[in-house]
C-alpha cells in the first residue's frame, strides 16, 4: 500500500519526495544544506551528479510503501527511465529543516 505524500510524517522529507515526484530539481536542491552528502548502496557519490542522473534527467519517482524513524526512513518503490522500478530504502538526516545527508539503496 502506497502512503500519500501528504501523509508522510517529516515535513522536510515530505517536501523532498514531492519535489522528486514533480521533477522539480530547484525545489529539491533548496532542501539540501550547502555541504549535503549522499550514498547509494553504501558508496558515497557526487550529490549533484547523482541527483541529475538518477532522479531528474531520468524522471525518478517514489511510491512510498512505509516509513519509520519519524518519517526519516522510507521504503519505496522507486522508478526511473534508466533502471525501471526497484524496491529501495531511503534514510534522511535532517538538520534545521534541511537535508544534510541521505542514503539510498536496494531494500
Image (spheres, grey):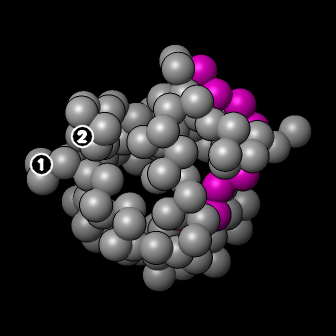
Residue 75 image point, x, y percent = 65, 35
- The residue where tag 1 is placed is 35
State the image quarter where residue 106 is shown: top right
Q: Nearer the viewer, residue 10 or 100?
A: 10
Farthest residue to the bottom: give it. Answer: 57
The residue positioned 40% from the left and 47% from the top of the image is 40
Secondary structure mainly formed by the magenta segment = strand
Secondary structure state at the residue bearing disc 1: strand
Residue receiving disc 2: 100
Determine whether 81 is above or below 68 in the image: below
| Residue 107 relative to residue 70: left or right | right
Residue 16: x, y in percent?
46, 52
Disc 2 to disc 1: CB gap under 8 Å: yes
Residue 12: horizontal and vertical position, in percent? Answer: 42, 42
**Which residue is found at the position 23% from the left and 59% from the top?**
46
52 horizontally vs 19: left or right: left
Check disc 1: other Cα within 10 Å, few if <14, some if 14-19, many if 20+: few
Amino acid at each position: 500500500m502506497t502512503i500519500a505524500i501528504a501523509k508522510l510524517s517529516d515535513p522536510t522529507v515530505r517536501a523532498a519526495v514531492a519535489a522528486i515526484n514533480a521533477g522539480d530539481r530547484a525545489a529539491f536542491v533548496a532542501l539540501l544544506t550547502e555541504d549535503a552528502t549522499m550514498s547509494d548502496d553504501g558508496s558515497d557519490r557526487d550529490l549533484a551528479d547523482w541527483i541529475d542522473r538518477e532522479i531528474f534527467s531520468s524522471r525518478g519517482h517514489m511510491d512510498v510503501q512505509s516509513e519509520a524513524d519519524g518519517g526519516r526512513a522510507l521504503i519505496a518503490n522507486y522508478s526511473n527511465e534508466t533502471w525501471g522500478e526497484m524496491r529501495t530504502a531511503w534514510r534522511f538526516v535532517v538538520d534545521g529543516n534541511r537535508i544534510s545527508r541521505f542514503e539510498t539503496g536496494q531494500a
